[in-house]
Image (spheres, rainbow, N blue to C red):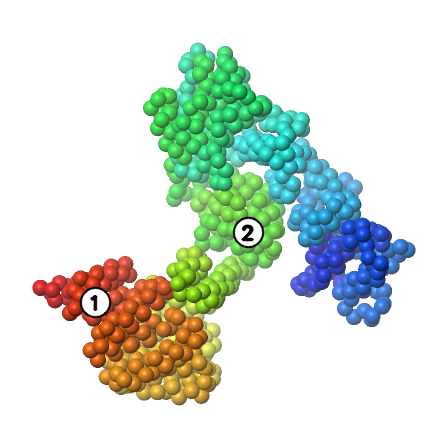
Amino acid sequence: MESSFWWTVLGPVRGRRAGREARLGSPQRRVLMALLLARAGQPLAMAEITRALWHGDPPELAANVVQGHVGAIRRMLEPELPRRATGRWLLPVPGGYRLAMTAETLDLLRFRELTAGQPSLGDLVEALSLATGDVAEDVPAEVRSHPVFTAVAEEYDAVLRAAADRALKDGMAAAVLPMVRAAVGRRPLDEELQASLMLLLHADGQHAAALELFGEVRDRLRQELGVHPGRGLHEAYRRVLADQPAESVPFIGREKELSALLARLPQPAEPAAVIAVTGMAGVGKTSLAMRAAQLAADRFPDGVLHVDLHGFTPGRPALTTTEAVRALLDVPDMCDPAALYRSSLAGRRMLVVLDNARDAEQARELLPGSDGCAAIVTSRDDLSGLVAFNDAYPIRLGLTTTGAPLTEDVRTSFTRSYEALSPAAATLFHALALHPTRDVEPVVAASMIGDEPQRARVLLAELASAHLIDEYRPGRYSWHGLVHDYGVEMATSRLPDAERDQLRRRLFDHYLFNNRQVGAIARMKLAAVPPEARVTPACAGYEAERLMLRSLMTQALAEGYGEYVWRFAGVIGDHLERAGGWSELLAAGTAALVAAERSGDPARTAQALRGLARVHAGLRDYPRAIELLSAAMPLFVAVDDRKALAGLHLGSAWLRAKAGRPAAGALHADRTLTITRRDAEPVGVASMLSAVGWFEARQARYEAAIGHSREALGILSALGMRRAQADTWDTLGFVNRRLGRYREALASYRRALALHREFGARAAEAATLRCIATVTRPHDPPASRKALDEAVEILRELGDPAADRMVSAADSHQS
């Protein structure tokens, strides 16, 4: 086992050597390997093995089965090992086996090395960060209860508690928050862990989050176990309530609103006051309320209460009055919660923060009535009911920092958080600054830093605990524009050019690979679904990422990554063409051609010329398109790409016909036929037949055109290529219209129209609607006008000037 071999058991059981993952084989073999790793360096008795593999009821030949697994594991660890040889790593001992490992080959032994003796907080954090899940996470749950695994889990938890205590003592809560969060996520009913998390959040300045956590844990314990929080959790809650919120991050940008809020709080003999803080999600309503509560705490000697009313919390209902009172007063079920609440506040001077209210009605019964009391209510609702009927003072928060400069005070605040990051989290922060949007999920973050998604989740949690990003919903992270600007500064000043280049390329590669897979899956699904069951647009999964791809293509163009520009253009080109996005494709295609020519690669240059010709054709610049295809032809000949060459001749035929030279186009179509027949590909033959049929139609050879078009439709139908059939049906509509067969023409055009709509080909849909309008005009004027109006509407959406010309022509025809 070389030093590059690395095994993990603090999470899924994995082994990697030289970048390749070891294949553990059957589930039983994985369990055995997990047991050996958890007992690394110590004997593992055969009785323990059989208990884990067969749950205490082993078969007669259990020992033989175990020996077979042992032999397979030995060969995996040492591929050159002769059969029946013992080897160096998996050794026999009396009554069992022992796996020889070191801290350089196993995460558990590295964990123990870091935590031995008198470790520093940094050592503890590094040790804890080795875990990527529960011990032996991917073995069956009933096996994980084996004493071998539970002992390791208890060892990890003891270190986690020690690290949390040390972090609280040293004022370094942010250092261990990610690990404690991850552990709580795995064991949400562990009250001791939840208490540690609550205290760490509070110490990190997340006072509101700490209070909210208590409510969530209390509700979960009652719902799932039917019990109330224990003494330890209550004690942590009382410590948070009694202590003023820690101020690890300065309060920025709301001084005016804060002053107005504090000025509205009553003096001892004044009537109770209500302040309504409203605004969109993320503008700082809770921060403002909690900052005011902190500063005004001395004015309310009987205490400050806080409750999250969950008015706008995704996935859970808003609190009822009973639930809210229970959360505020921490009392069991009651007969009259409102009466109990009023009596508890009577004669006292208290400040109540009613956070995240759904509306005025939800908050109204919780407003204190005694002189000298106050309530701060936050909500996305405008709370106009409280303003009108409860004399609430309104404070509306807006996005005041949009476009604001990155001031030194703000930069200093961010730097304090940035410098506390681990090196891996700092690298991820740099990577996020290069992302074209301010919204990311763990799988994207993992690709950018070249790590596993689980590791990326841990690092994202660390960034969130440092207030640099926000998990606005489970698994999705965003960050403010000022944080983005700061991140760009750090990535530019702290990262060498080579590292920035690597991060960008990983980002581009992730989306290119991901969207190729989405597009392929969408196409396969489309072919397998009957027409009547299809949902349009056909490639819905691909469409969801379209805007991201366009942003990345723009970024690649701006940053000089020409080779990625043409690759992005290839992935999204079909969509942009169907949507009429020619101007965007022209910029991308031009940049791609420049990059291809610089590379000196004839194949890439030929592809770029062909792609740019297609764009010029879409812009109706047929001479330029023909020129580009002519330049590409000798390059495809040089690289012996005959399939591409046939396609080029087909494109040249189409362009020459569009340019008013159908006879010259027919020569290129014949050349396409010659090349394609040589390869005898059904798809190529069908495309050739469709093309020749189209040219024959343009040259008034109508019966021949019908024959070739129908033959093409037969092949395309057998291949399930529905999109390609649309143009052929258009050809049949054109031919039948020229022959005076209006019923057949209309039927053909309608078949084409349905396919254009199914695949979102908007420009083609408009063209076919115009043909339908022409066919129906003599016999059904209302239907003709309806088709024309629909065509005009589509062309206007696409910004096509032909729309106005069509309207003028239709009006003059009617008059």
- Compared with 176, 46 (above or below) is below
The residue pinned by badge 2 equals 442
Total of numbered circles in the picture?
2
Q: Which residue is pictured at 74% across the width and 45% down the height?
A: 145
Q: Which residue is pictured at 22% across the width and 65% down the height?
A: 802
Residue 584: where, in percent of width, then height? 35, 63
Q: Quadrant of the C terminus?
A: bottom left
Q: Which residue is pictured at 17% across the width and 66% down the height?
A: 780
Marks 1 and 2 in Cβ contact (< 8 Å): no
Quarter of image, res 379: top left
Q: Label for residue 773? A: 1
Q: Residues within 10 Å of mark 2 (few under 14, many from 20)?
A: many
Front residue of 576 and 395: 576
Left or right of 450 in this view: 663: left
Considering the numbered disc 2 on the image, is that residue within a helix, a strand or a loop?
helix
| Label 1 – label 2 distance at C-alpha | 51 Å
- Compared with 505, 244 (above or below) is above
Q: Amino acid at mark 1?
A: Ala
Front residue of 606 and 417: 606
Q: Which residue is pictured at 48% across the width and 62% down the height?
A: 518
Considering the numbered disc 1 on the image, is that residue within a helix, a strand or a loop?
helix
Residue 19: where, in percent of width, then height? 66, 63
